[in-house]
Amino acid sequence: MFRPEEMVKIEVITLNRYKDGLLTYLHENGAVEVRELNVKVAQRDSPNEYHRKAASYSITISRLVDFLRAHKRKGKGSIKEFIFPPERKKRKYKYEGIEKLIKDVEEFLSKVEPEVKATEAKITSLQTEIERIKSDISVLELLSSLNIDVSYLRSTDMLEIVVGTVDRNRFKPLLEEVSKATGGRVVVVSKELKDRVLAVFVFLKGDYEKANPILAKYSLERIEIPEGEGTPRELIREYEAKLKEKEKDLEDAKKDAEKLAEKYYEDVVFYKELVENERDKSSVLPMLARTNMTFALTGWLPRAEVTKILEGIKRLTSGKAYINVLEPSEEELEEIPIKLNNPGWAKPFEMLTEMYGVPRYDEIDPTPIITFTYSFFFGFMLTDFMYGLIVGLVAALLVKGHKKLNDGTYKFAYTLLISSFFTMFMGAIFGSYFGNALDLAGFHVPRVWDTFENALVVLQLALAIGLAHLFTGYTIGFVVKLKNGDKKGALFDQLSWMLIILGIVVLALASGSQSAKLTGEVIFGIGLVLFAIGEVVNNKGLAALLIISDFFGFVGSWLSYARLMALALATSGIAMVVNILVQMIWGIKFLYIGPIVGVILFIGGQLFSVAINSLGAFVHSLRLQYVEFFGTFYSGDGKPFEPFKAKREVSELEFEA
């Protein structure tokens, strides 16, 4: 806790014949982040033909998965399934090497791929045919206004016939220019359609070359004449009959696809996961170095995993491996991957830290601190007992349903669950139960402070909390910089603000005591002097400007905590408005309209208030962590630990080292 997981560097050299097994072992354990090895006397490793086949087959199987998923019968997607998602069953596969896996995949594809692709091609062909028929029907509906046999609209050996639509304002000049160019040897049949004109132009073959550029000039949109004979209305009936036939064929083809999805979908997803993991496993090969007989790899792993990984490597290679475990050097501090290490009660809050950035190896992990401060700020801003209860109940259900998955929903719901307890606590302090609903109902609600009547007290409390939060950050920064040997930074960048904050606190609590006031002024003055010296040392000639800028930046950060009071007031205000509206409507007794509408308005309005104010509390609580608190001591510039790890959702590898 407070420190990232201790990491060590590992170097391994062993025989090439153990490569596939060793990489599989490391991939399944997911404890090592493999790094690129720079060795001049050896060459880079590279994927072999089986690895390339795995990459190729992953693309092929992905296409099969997409097709079968599209035609898989959908579940109901109920709220219950969202809250309590079913756990996917894992199917075991006995791994005997990449060659055997590729052989199994090829055998599976030889059976499944032809069936799926044949059905896919049939569906695609039918869909194309249906779209073509629909397009032809649209054309025929357009031509129906002319009531001319469609066969007369096709060109012959002697005549060139053009059918199309043109803007109404362009039609007349088009006619004049075409007639002039062809010497009047043109027949035109037209029909006005709103702002356009449908026209049929009949030319002699020899005159078409002259007329064609003019048609293009006036932007004539040509129409392809559908096949068949008879009037457009007669052909529409024929085409609609064809359309129904093709749509029935399409439905039959889709039913075939549904059967294939039911038969093969789980198998296809299973093999997809196997080959994708094999493809990902081969992605580290260019990071390795090899000779004709041996290969070498290096990487980082948590100290707690060293014994287990070393035993596995020795067992897998029958002891024929050189293994070197190294402590990180100071030069490698920026390269060490960061794996957060927190107890179970704080672990879900790592999500909030990671959203900003993980700490460097020589920094403090703020997750345990923000577990408390984020939740407390959330509760202070939402500050309603019933709102906290609603958020807590929803969050508790999601935590219970998603705990086994340990996914993002579980982590987010866990943070809301903890925050809901603080919300209920602060709601009881301020006597807020759906705002002032209980007061309006005639109940006596005990409260320490009233959000509106004691707004100044709430503001003072928010600013005091802000000073405590900032002081905590500067203190952590002071300890970290002192431990890392940055005495100048600890003195001028951290201790100066600690003294300024202490001075402000002493002055605020002086209560007319001259000695306390003098003590506060001295502490504040020393801090201010250290701050000014630090600005001169760090910024030289720009110090005069930056002293003012940075000092008022601190003041701005402090005043930013006033949002605790502002959002608490907003929550109470929205709830109060809802209650007043309900009170106004409740008095309408006709057909019980008042009580019925009032209940609906109360429930809907309060739920809206819960949602909108919870969102505000979430965003602004994060802001106070990321901007104000982290700005005092935390960089978040660490590199997250990205282990060489298999992704297993539906498959489980049986692998014997």
Image (spheres, helix red, strand yellow):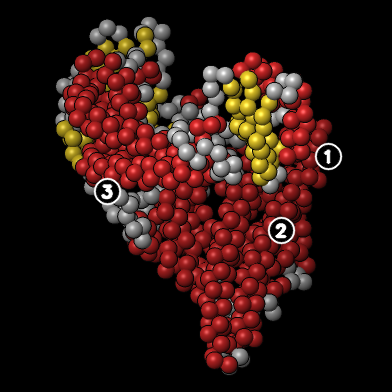
- Crowding around mark 2 (Cα neighbors within 10 Å: few <14, some 14 to 19, many 20+) is some
Counting from the top left corner in percent of width and height, residue 568 is at 63, 69
| Relative horizontal placement of residue 642, taking residue 22 as reference (left or right) | right
Q: Amino acid at mark 2?
A: Leu
Q: Residue at x 70, y 17 (%)?
A: 210
Q: Amino acid at mark 1?
A: Ala
Q: Which of the 4 image quarters holds residue 493?
A: top right
- Crowding around mark 1 (Cα neighbors within 10 Å: few <14, some 14 to 19, many 20+) is few
Counting from the top left corner in percent of width and height, residue 61 is at 30, 31
- Mark sitting earlier along the chain (3/2): 3
- Crowding around mark 3 (Cα neighbors within 10 Å: few <14, some 14 to 19, many 20+) is few
Q: Residue at x 64, y 29 (%)?
A: 201
| Relative horizontal placement of residue 497, taking residue 349 as reference (left or right) | right
Counting from the top left corner in percent of width and height, residue 99 is at 20, 21
- Mark sitting earlier along the chain (1/3): 3
Q: Is residue 171 visible?
A: yes
Per the model, the C-alpha gap separating discs 1 and 2 is: 23 Å
Circle 1/circle 2 CB separation < 8 Å: no
Q: Amino acid at mark 3?
A: Arg
Tally the marks.
3
**SS state under label 2:** helix
Residue 173 drawn above or below residue 372: above
Q: Classify the position of the C terminus by image quarter.
A: top left
| Relative horizontal placement of residue 381, taking residue 547 as reference (left or right) | left
Circle 1/circle 3 CB separation < 8 Å: no
Q: Which of the 4 image quarters holds residue 245?
A: top left
Mark 3 lies on residue:
88
Point out which mark residue 544 bears: 1
Residue 380 drawn above or below residue 364: below
Q: Nearer the viewer, residue 256 or 311?
A: 256
**SS state under label 1:** helix
Point out which mark residue 559 bears: 2
